[in-house]
Image (spheres, coloured by chain):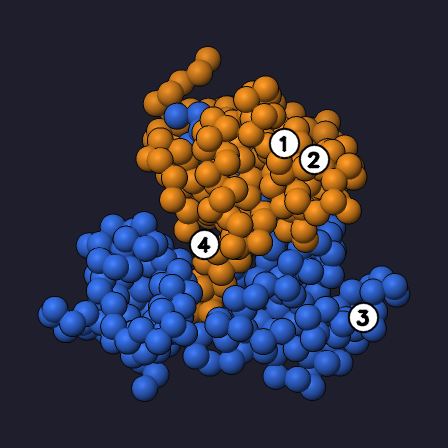
Chain colours: A blue, B orange
Amino acid sequence: MKNLNKFNTIPEPTLRRLSYYVVYLQKLLDAGIETVSSTQIANNLMFDPTQVRKDLQLTEISGHPKIGFNIKTTLESIKSSLNWNNIENAFLVGVGNLGNAVLNFSLLKYMGVNIVAAFDNNPEKIGNIVNNVEILDIERLPELSKLMKVNIGIIAVPEHAAQETADKFVAGGIKAIWNLLPCRLKVPDEIIIEEANLMQSLAVLTNQLAK
Amino acid sequence: MKNLNKFNTIPEPTLRRLSYYVVYLQKLLDAGIETVSSTQIANNLMFDPTQVRKDLQLTEISGHPKIGFNIKTTLESIKSSLNWNNIENAFLVGVGNLGNAVLNFSLLKYMGVNIVAAFDNNPEKIGNIVNNVEILDIERLPELSKLMKVNIGIIAVPEHAAQETADKFVAGGIKAIWNLLPCRLKVPDEIIIEEANLMQSLAVLTNQLAK
């Protein structure tokens, strides 16, 4: 079933929109609805209908004229394109406001990301449980990286500790780093880095506001 | 000095990179350094040098052969392109983990965004001060929107309250909404929406990991 070409050919803006489709289609499915049209998806999510049709084509799903898309198979196809039907284990480092927001992020369960442990260096936080995830001493990260099959490392530490955390993840064999801080990280070429920080996004907003 | 064309012609990926340049150049300036080459910027931030030169051209700044870029004027030019040299007042609604992360975001001061008040509906939070910002009763949002000159509304509430918050912002005359939740908002066409949510970013990461 795994089609590597499919993963390669979906552009980033489509991937971002597809994540919304998953949430919407899951809601419809939970409500017992079986089919949906691309126009309905577009109207509900306020996207352009032509755009929605193009996006769905990229996930290799096709609708039936007058009937629309079967929600169950469409959802599976989109999740497969996003790799959300595989469970990937993740470590999170830094249990401050940002780390807590990620640990409590309710949609994470749809995304195939399973945070198996969180780490902090604050003795007051170590041993606490946040949303079923235990907070462990950061010193244990190298040891546990080798023991557990963890592909994703999430960095939510204060900025000055970000590179050090990335180095620990790389040494522990993690394949992808999700960096929530407004700083750039130096990692080997084969490591995937995805940056999700407030600064970048605010730059887009403030520029738009000036127009 | 204000050049409206400049705001229009800078593509989003460039805006995102420019935000990193601001932080780096500010550090150099604080250290008393006066000039920098595009290669230095590229090496430090791990961007492609050609890309950096193109990005800087878009902000209408030019370097001097062998001397490089004057840091002070380059910083001003980039900040002007991002509209970070104008102070924009902002309201934040929802002082949970995400809201606290924004209120404590130390780089906000470089970005010309001044959070003048935060709002919540939890009586235990109302009256508290987070990073010099007072938390007010959400009921006061409409009244205060009209009194204070606020252009940016930041939404960090639980998802089910996001649309309601957006409606309040629109009614209060806010021009741009920064939506930190993984949901789409219905607002009039003239309102700027910038989405910065964990879900979208994770969709890009998990897809990359599958390749």
| SS type, badge 3 | loop
N-term mark: 2 or 4: 2
Q: Which chain carries label 1?
A: B
N-term mark: 4 or 1: 1
Q: What amino acid type should be assigned to the residue bearing mark 3?
A: Asn
Q: Tell me the CA gap for discs 2 and 3.
A: 30 Å
Q: Which chain carries label 2?
A: B
| SS type, badge 1 | helix
Same subunit under labels 4 and 3? no
Figure check: A33 above or below A24: below
| Residue at point 46%, 38% (across, down) | B167
Q: In this view, does A62 lie to the left or right of B146?
A: left
Q: Is residue B58 left or right of residue A128?
A: left
Label 3: few (<14), some (14–19) or many (≥20) C-alpha neighbours in 10 Å: some
Figure check: B195 above or below A119: above
Q: What amino acid type should be assigned to the residue bearing mark 4?
A: Cys
Label 1: few (<14), some (14–19) or many (≥20) C-alpha neighbours in 10 Å: few
Disc number lying in front (4 or 3): 4
Residue with the mark numbered 1 = B140
Residue with the mark numbered 4 = B183
